[in-house]
C-alpha cells in the first residue's frame, strides 16, 4: 500500500529561548501552550503542534512554513492582529498577495523572534462547473 501523508502532527524548530518563543506564538497566533519540558516547550492547536527546543535557530534551513486559514476575512483579521502586535511583516503596504506569480491562493508572510519565515494563506476556491443540458 502506498504511503498517504495526513495532517502534520508536529514539527520542531530550534529557538534561543523556548519560553519567550512560546509566549510569542501564544500572543500572535492564538496557539495554546501544550506543555513544557527541560529545554523546550510545545505550543499548538488541534491541527498542529510546534515544538520549540533550546538551540541555535536555523531559519535558513527552511524557506517558510505555511498555515491555511479558512477565508480572506480571517487572513485580513490575522494581518491586523500581527500589525497591532508589531510583528515583522514582509511587503509593507501590500502585505496580502498571491502565493506565487499567477497563483490564485493568497497569503501574507512574516518573521518570528528567531528569524523563521511563516506564511498564512487562503486557498483559492475551485470553480463550480456548470453542466450543460443536452
Image (cartoon, rainbow, N blue to C red):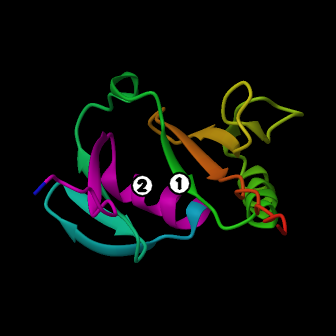
Q: Which of 33/47 is in front?
A: 47
Q: Position of residue 72 (x, y in %)?
A: 79, 60
Above/below status of 82 relative to 14: below
In percent of the image, x 41 and y 71: which residue is there?
A: 47
Looking at the rendered structure, which numbered label has been put on residue 23?
none
The secondary element bearing badge 2 is classed as helix
Query: How far is mark 1 from mark 2, CA to CA?
Result: 21 Å
Looking at the rendered structure, which numbered label has been put on residue 67?
1
Q: Position of residue 27 (x, y in %)?
A: 58, 65
Please provide the residue range marked out in magenta: 2-28
Q: Position of residue 15 (x, y in %)?
A: 33, 42
Residue labelled with disc 2: 20
When asked about the image quadrant of residue 133, the answer is bottom right
Q: Earlier in the sequence, mark 1 or mark 2?
A: 2
Which quarter of the rendered picture does the C terminus lie within? bottom right
The secondary element bearing badge 1 is classed as strand
Dot 1 crowding, Cα within 10 Å, few <14, some 14–19, many 20+: few
**Residue 6 is one of the magenta-drawn residues:** yes
Q: Which of 118/68 is in front?
A: 68
In percent of the image, x 50 and y 41: which residue is there?
A: 113
Farthest residue, direction left: 1
Farthest residue, direction right: 93
Dot 2 crowding, Cα within 10 Å, few <14, some 14–19, many 20+: some
Q: Is residue 110 left or right of residue 91?
A: left
Amino acid at each position: 500500500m502506498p504511503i498517504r501523508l495526513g495532517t502534520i502532527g508536529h514539527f520542531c524548530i530550534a529557538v534561543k529561548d523556548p519560553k519567550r518563543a512560546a509566549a510569542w506564538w501564544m500572543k500572535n497566533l492564538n496557539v495554546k501552550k501544550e506543555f513544557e519540558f527541560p529545554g523546550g516547550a510545545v505550543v499548538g492547536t488541534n491541527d498542529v503542534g510546534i515544538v520549540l527546543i533550546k538551540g541555535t535557530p536555523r531559519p535558513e534551513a527552511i524557506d517558510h512554513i505555511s498555515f491555511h486559514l479558512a477565508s480572506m476575512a480571517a487572513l485580513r483579521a490575522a494581518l491586523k492582529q500581527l500589525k497591532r502586535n508589531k510583528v515583522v511583516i514582509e511587503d509593507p503596504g501590500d502585505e496580502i498577495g498571491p502565493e506565487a506569480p499567477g497563483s490564485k491562493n493568497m497569503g501574507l508572510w512574516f518573521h518570528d523572534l528567531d528569524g523563521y519565515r511563516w506564511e498564512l494563506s487562503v486557498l483559492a476556491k475551485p470553480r463550480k462547473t456548470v453542466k450543460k443540458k443536452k
